[in-house]
Image: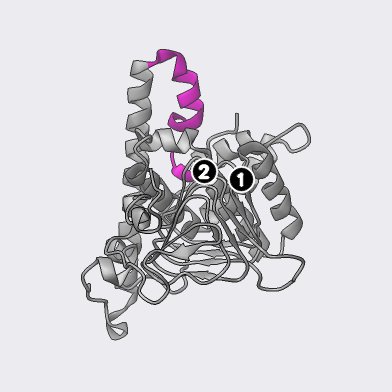
Amino acid sequence: MATCVHSSRTETPPQTNPPTADDHVFNTYLKYCRPNYPSLPISEINSKTLNRQTDTVFERIDDLWLRMKDEARSDIDQEPILCNYYFNSILSHDSMESALANYLSMKLSNSSLPIFTLYDLFLGLLTEEQEIIRAVTDDLTAVKERDPACISYVHCFLNFKGFLAIQAHRIAHNLWSKGRKILALLIQNRVSEVFAVDIHPGAKIGRGILLDHATGVVVGETAVIGNNVSILHNVTLGGTGKACGDRHPKIGDGVLIGAGTCVLGNVRIEDGAKIGAGSMVLKRVPARTTAVGNPARLIGGIDNPVKMDNMPSLTMDQTSHMSEWSNYVI
């Protein structure tokens, strides 16, 4: 088991383009499903303001970590045989960075890729790149809020392979962006073998992501996934052939993609759209509309599509308006 290493947050890490509103507003973005919150004018931004915002983010991360440790202790009370498991995975660590680095290294290591090598690599990146650990907390919150099968944060952290696959991808993408492509591709391969989720390290993925069940998810190199997106199992965001360059889908904020869906080519699924299960999408899907079928068609028709008022990735509503697509819906 990897040794617990303290990762202090007493020093504020450097940031680029920090948020200019409080953390809640920063993560609530679709205009059609929220009121207009005021933003802080650029002229009022100073180091004191930015430090206060950073402290708030770190407090939220630390509060969630303390809650996870309380959940782990509660689980041990119910199932004492899990004492060593929870101690090694959660309770022996003083930060989420350390616990995540340790757990991912255990999952992805093999006889020729030692756990300690991966642990040192992962912990270094998670400690250095604080944006990753912020995204981790948003993903944890997303799973807990949207998946009724998730009974606690620590349950998601330890048992949901979609969550773990996304965090491993965040590390691989960071390595890819720094030119360490061979190592990034190795991590991609191990994630594919262990979690049955194949996300190219070049793909760009936002925060607040739910991969529900996750088995069979494939995401291509030039794909982009926005914030607060929910994707079910057996979804492919792929290309259409041997073409090079920018060839994979662009998924907007708040999108819900149903199970067994294929979105192929450099097409845009715009903010707040919903793709029904089993669909084949080859063209742009406008914001707040629902596409379903093979090939996919817009509910209400292309000239007057039905528009949604709620963010589908948050409601996880996969059946509304479907009867308008076909009379033969059971």
| Kind of residue at badge 1 | Val
Query: In the depicted view, which residue is nearer to us: 268 or 300?
Result: 300
Q: Residue furthest front?
A: 327
Q: Secondary structure at mark 1?
A: loop
Q: Which residue is tagged 1?
A: 197
Which image quadrant is residue 201 in? bottom right
Q: Quadrant of the N terminus?
A: top right
Residue at 26% from the left image edge and 76% from the top image edge:
39
Give the answer, above or below, for where 253 lies relative to 133: below
Expressed as whole percent of the image width and height from the top left, the position of residue 237 reads: 59, 59
Q: Is residue 93 visible?
A: no
Expressed as whole percent of the image width and height from the top left, the position of residue 308 reads: 30, 64
| Kind of residue at badge 2 | Gly
- Main secondary-structure element of the magenta-colored stretch: helix
Q: Does residue 3 appear to the left or right of 211 in the view shown?
A: right
Query: Magenta region: which residues?
Result: 79-98
Q: Which residue is tagged 2?
A: 162
Q: Is residue 60 visible?
A: yes
